[in-house]
């Protein structure tokens, strides 16, 4: 009888161990630290080590209006085109060189001890450009606000209209070269079975013309159009089957000017595919050279 009781207890203990050892469900992102929830940000608004940066769709002439109308308390507006882009480059929207980036981050009050939270009013499609830029220059403490301004406001969280002038700090850039692809890298990648080129542009733009061998994965498709939050991991995994990206392949993302491409890069990071890089020059650089090959899909297919 005692032996039966002991065996039963062992079975129960093993069952408990089995339960506690079950891996996290596949709905959990591999790198959840790349996102900030609205709850987390609300609890850290007064933290001097947290800096909130807001960006916007620079294609709209009124892209700054949403900031002046009301932004998350303490947020600083960053114009991605005029402030984050290299004014000396022949290619529009190319990232600032190290010294220029250091000066910009210093003016935003960002240093090595700062956790940066960046958001926009489009689910992060534009904010991801700064997320990528900071990581490219060696600063990993950066998060995208999941759901952005839309989620923040629907939860009736506070907004303010005051302009913020942070104290100047010292930021030191440390380039992570594998996070940025050049036009030469992309040329070599065409047809390379170890590399997958991914267009983050909307489907019509991809069909009209794309880099040869590129697969289409439009950046907006990663977002729930109602909540403006990232899709759960299961849904993202299913969505990305279209890219036919294998675990050991290098992914090179691109778009028009390195914005949507940065968002696809963020999604890949969330899913755990860290062997990925952004073609900074993107389509604006590639299409400007008539000698470079372009593929298009006939309208009747």
Image (tube, rainbow, N blue to C red):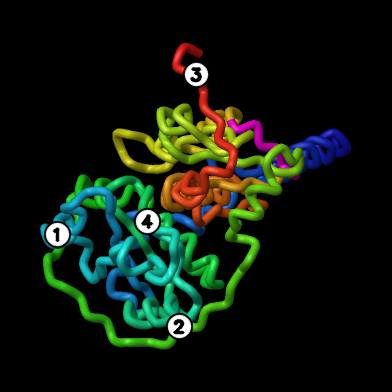
Q: Which residues are magenta?
A: 243-248
Q: Nearer the viewer, mark 3 or mark 4?
A: 3
* 136 over 258 or under it: above or below: below
Q: Mark 4 to mark 1: distance in Å?
A: 17 Å
Q: Nearer the viewer, mark 3 or mark 2?
A: 3
Residue with the mark numbered 3 = 298
Q: Hey, which quadrant is residue 48 in on the image? A: bottom left
Q: Mark 2 to mark 1: distance in Å?
A: 28 Å
Residue with the mark numbered 1 = 70
Chain-order first, disc 3 or disc 4: 4
Q: List x then y, in percent, for residue 119.
A: 33, 57
Chain-order first, disc 4 or disc 1: 1
Residue farthest to the top? Answer: 300
Which residue is pictured at 32% across the width and 81% down the height? 107
Chain-order first, disc 3 or disc 1: 1
Residue with the mark numbered 2 = 171
Which residue is pictured at 44% across the width and 49% down the height? 284
Q: Hey, which quadrant is residue 214 in on the image? A: top right
Q: Mark 3 to mark 2: distance in Å?
A: 49 Å
Residue farthest to the front? Answer: 291
Q: Residues within 10 Å of mark 1 (few under 14, many from 20)?
A: some
Q: List x then y, in percent, for residue 233.
A: 53, 38
Left or right position of 42 against 67: right
* 236 over 103 or under it: above or below: above
* 300 over 15 or under it: above or below: above
Residue with the mark numbered 4 = 127
């Amino acid at each position: 009888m005692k032996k039966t009781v002991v065996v039963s207890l062992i079975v129960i203990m093993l069952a408990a161990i089995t339960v506690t050892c079950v891996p996290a469900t596949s709905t959990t992102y591999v790198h959840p630290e790349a996102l900030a929830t609205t709850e987390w940000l609300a609890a850290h608004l007064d933290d001097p080590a947290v800096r909130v940066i807001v960006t916007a769709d620079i294609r709209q002439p009124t892209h700054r209006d949403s900031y002046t109308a009301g932004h998350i308390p303490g947020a600083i507006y960053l114009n991605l085109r005029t402030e984050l882009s290299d004014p000396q480059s022949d290619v529009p929207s190319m990232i600032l060189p190290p010294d220029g980036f250091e000066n910009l981050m210093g003016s935003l009050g960002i240093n090595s001890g700062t956790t940066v939270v960046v958001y926009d009013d489009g689910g992060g499609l534009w904010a991801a450009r700064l997320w990528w830029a900071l990581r490219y220059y060696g600063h990993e403490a950066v998060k995208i606000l999941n759901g952005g301004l839309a989620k923040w406001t629907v939860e009736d969280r506070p907004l303010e209209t005051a302009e913020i002038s942070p104290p100047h700090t010292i930021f030191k850039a440390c380039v992570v070269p594998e996070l940025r692809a050049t036009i030469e890298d992309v040329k070599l990648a065409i047809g390379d079975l170890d590399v997958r080129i991914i267009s983050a542009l909307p489907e019509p733009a991809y069909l009209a013309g794309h880099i040869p061998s590129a697969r289409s994965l439009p950046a907006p498709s990663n977002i729930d159009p109602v909540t403006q939050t990232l899709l759960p991991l299961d849904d993202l995994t299913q969505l990305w089957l279209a890219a036919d990206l294998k675990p050991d392949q290098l992914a090179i993302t691109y778009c028009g000017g390195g914005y949507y491409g940065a968002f696809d890069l963020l999604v890949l990071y969330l899913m755990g595919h860290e062997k990925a890089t952004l073609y900074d020059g993107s389509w604006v650089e590639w299409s400007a050279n008539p000698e470079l090959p372009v593929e298009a899909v006939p309208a009747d297919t």
